[in-house]
Every structure is written in C-alpha cells, then in structure tokens.
Image (cartoon, rainbow, N blue to C red):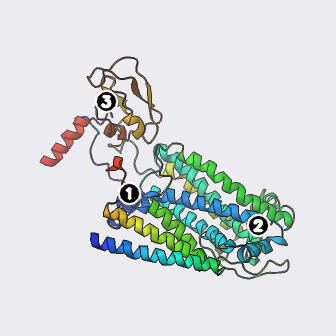
Amino acid sequence: MSTGAGIAPSPPRSRYGRFMTGVLRGTLKLDVWINKVYPADYNPLYYTGGLSNLFLFILVLSGIFLFFYYEASLVEGFASVQYITLGVPYGGLIRGVHRYAADGFIVAVLLHLFRNWFTDRYLFSRDNPWISGMFLLIFGGFVGFTGYQLVWDERAQVLTAMFVGMLRSLPLIGDWLARVFIGGAGVSDGTLVRALFLHIGPASALYVMLWWHYLRLRHPKIWPPATWVLASVGLVFLLAGVIPATSGQPAAPAGRPASFPMDIFFLIPFWLLNYMSPFAVMVLLGALFTLGFAIPYIARREAPQEMSVRHAGVAQVIDGNCTGCELCFFDCPYNAIAMVPSPAPGLSRAAANRTWLAVVIESRCVECGICIGACPFEALELPKFLERDVQAQVLEAVRA
Amino acid sequence: MRNMYTAGIVLLSGLSLAFALGILYGEATDRWFFGGALVGALLMAYSGIVLLLRKMGIIGPRKAER
C-alpha cells in the first residue's frame, strides 16, 4: 500500500478551517434538502452562475430598449425616464424588468460566490474563476450604482454628492478622481454623460470578464434549466408589473433631501455613511475586496501534504493501455488533457488500432482523479493514489 | 403522487389560459403594467408545468445523463 494515501482527509486544524468545514456541511445538507423538492438536475443552487448570466442577459436586452429613449443631460435625464415609464408602451414595465433583473443578478452572484467559497471551489487552478468573479462582482455593483444616477432624481443627486465625497476623502488622488467622475469642479450635463458611459462601459466589460471567468472551465453551466429560465424571467416581469419602478422628485440644484429610499443590493456603502466617515467607508470597501481577492491564496484549509487524498500526484497516462477514445479529454474540467497523434500502437488489444494518444498537461492538472473515473481502459493513474491501494483501503475499512 | 402531479399540471394549464386572456385584456385596454405582470405570471406557471413534467419523468434528464 502506498504511504500517505488515506481515504479521509486530515481534519482541519485552525478555527477558520473548522468554521469552513461547518459551512460546507451546512451547504451540502441544504443541497440534500432541495434535492428532495427538485430533481438534482433542477436544483437551483447548482446553477447560481447560470442564473447570474441569465439576469445579465435580461439586463442587456432591457437596457438596450431603455437606451433608445434615454437622454443624458441634467434637464432631460429625469424627463426622459418619466417618458419611458409613462409614455412609451410597456416602457415602465421594461424599466421595472431592468431594475429587478439587476437585483436578481446581485443575489445570484452573491449566492454563487458563497456557494463556491463554502464548497472549496476556489482552490488551486480554480483561483482564475474566483478572481474574475470578484471583478464581476465589483463591476456589477458599480454598474448598479451608476444606474441609480441616470434617473437623476433627488436620490441620484444625493448619491452623486455622497460618492464624490467618498472619492475626495482619498488622499493624493481623491480630488482628481472626483473631477474625472463628475466631469469638472461641479455637477453639469457632462456628469450624466459620464454616468451613462460608466453604466454601459463596465456593463459591456462584464462579458469580457465572463470570457475570462469561463476560460479554465471545461463544462461551465452557462444557462440554467428551462424551468428556472421561465421562473426567473417570469418573476422579474411579475415584480415589474405589480411593484413598478418609480422615480423620486426631480433633482433640483438647491435641493438637499435628508433621506432617500434604500436599495439593500447596491446602496449599502451609502447607508454606512450614516455611521462612518467617507474615508472609513472607502477603506472598508478596499479591505473587503482585497480580502476577497486574497481568499484563494490565504485561506487554504490544509496544505497539499495534509490533504493526502488530494495530494496524489499529477495524472499519468499508461501509454500501452490508452485507446485514444478521448473520454478523459472531454471529462477533464481543467483542460489538462490533450490528444496527440499516436506515435505507435498501444500494447493492449483495445489500444492496438488507436490513432490518438492522451497526454497530460502537468501545469493544468489539479490531481482530482476525474480522468481516472472517465477512463474505462485503466490507462490513467494518479501515481500516489493507485486504484489497487484504494481497493485495499476499502477492504481494510470494511473488515475493521 | 403521479395523480397529484397531473392535477397540478391541469391546474397550472388552466391558470395559464386565464393569464393569457388577461394579457389580451391588458393590451386591449392599454393597461401595460397589468398585462406585463400577467406575462410574468404566465411564464412562472409554465415553469411549474415544466418542473412537474420533469418530476413525472416525462421530460429529461438527457439520455447521456441517465
């Protein structure tokens, strides 16, 4: 039996590790409970990424509709939104769809983030989707904020003033950032043009980040099952019809409203300004996102040496048994297997007439063992975790 | 259980028909929010039908996943 290849992983040692193990168990229990209500292939928690993508798609389509009618100026901004809401056939409905799809997007993204965090799906080569996902969250949040600006009602006016205050609180670059954001020393027509650009530009960039997000995933679940597509689209239409999106009073240069309707999905940082200074809020946001980016690198529960099951060595192709069937090539989620023209026939009868040979790209292999399960010809092994060892350990466990 | 699913599908189909008529009414009377809300309700009823069909085993999963 090979050493260091136990079935059970080493128990996590730190308090953080024990906490993460607890939330992992809780997440899996939730999965089991939902699977009793929905078939496993319809479990919405398996499609939080696909649901985010669906809401983003709804946002893009409804946003294009709104863009046709919107005018980015202090005088016309509010009026054009009112015209969309009350004058354009179904315009108010589409505005509501845009509004509620934005909330759905943030909820789905946060569910996706927490689920992948709690189930360890950010370690090793999965740091790539994690980092790109953090960018998607930041850009998505910022796009939501600039969306509130575009309405240019009293709330938009206060939010703009608060955000400029937060920017100005930053040392050295604060004033410059504030000027760039509002397009001069004070709010002008250029401010809303910039807000429109800062709404559409980062929103378009989300698709570049999605490409990055999917880059190392072999079979990403880009779209949820039909029932969830119908339910999600239906829900945003229903909400848009029953609780229409509305504007407040139009912004006035002399207006100084003391409060405004809160949105818990996009405007939490502004709520914090009730209790903290603008600089403290900026530091808190910076710290939160820095921590988010650092999670794949600082929060590993166990070192590879401790994870005896996972530290199994890079997968090896047993040349003589490989038939070139490509099953491992299609199953590897990390794109770590390439098929090359076979230089010679294999040794086994099944491999005698092969035309392709599987080759492991070591830099991409995360030693997960998926390819071993995919191969029916025993042509792949994890060198420190051989199949015969697993069988021996199972027998030993059964006897004990 | 299968009878309950069937009854659910029949109920949702009836509701869908009512929602569709409501959409037509909303369109005819320029009640855009009313019609739009019923579009949402119709889609949600459809999603329920798809879910029940799946639970009955009439649709999905794909052959390769069986």
* Image location (x, y in percent) of residue A365: 43, 36
- Residue drawn at 49 percent across, 44 percent down: A217
**Label 2 to label 1, Cα distance in Å?**
41 Å
Q: Quadrant of residue A183?
A: bottom right
Q: Amino acid at mark 2?
A: Tyr
Residue beneath the point at 47% across and 36% down: A364
Residue A25 visible in image: no
Q: Secondary structure at mark 3?
A: loop
The residue where tag 3 is placed is A379
The residue identified by callout 1 is: A41
**Can residue B25 be seen in this snapshot?**
yes
Circle 2 residue: A69
Q: Which mark is residue A244?
A: none
Q: Position of residue A3 (x, y in %)?
A: 26, 36
Q: Chain of mark 2?
A: A
**Chain letter behind tag 1:** A
Total of numbered circles in the picture?
3
Q: How crowded is the residue under tag 2: few (<14 C-alpha within 10 Å), some, or many (20+)?
A: some
Measured Cα–Cα span from mark 2 to mark 3:
61 Å
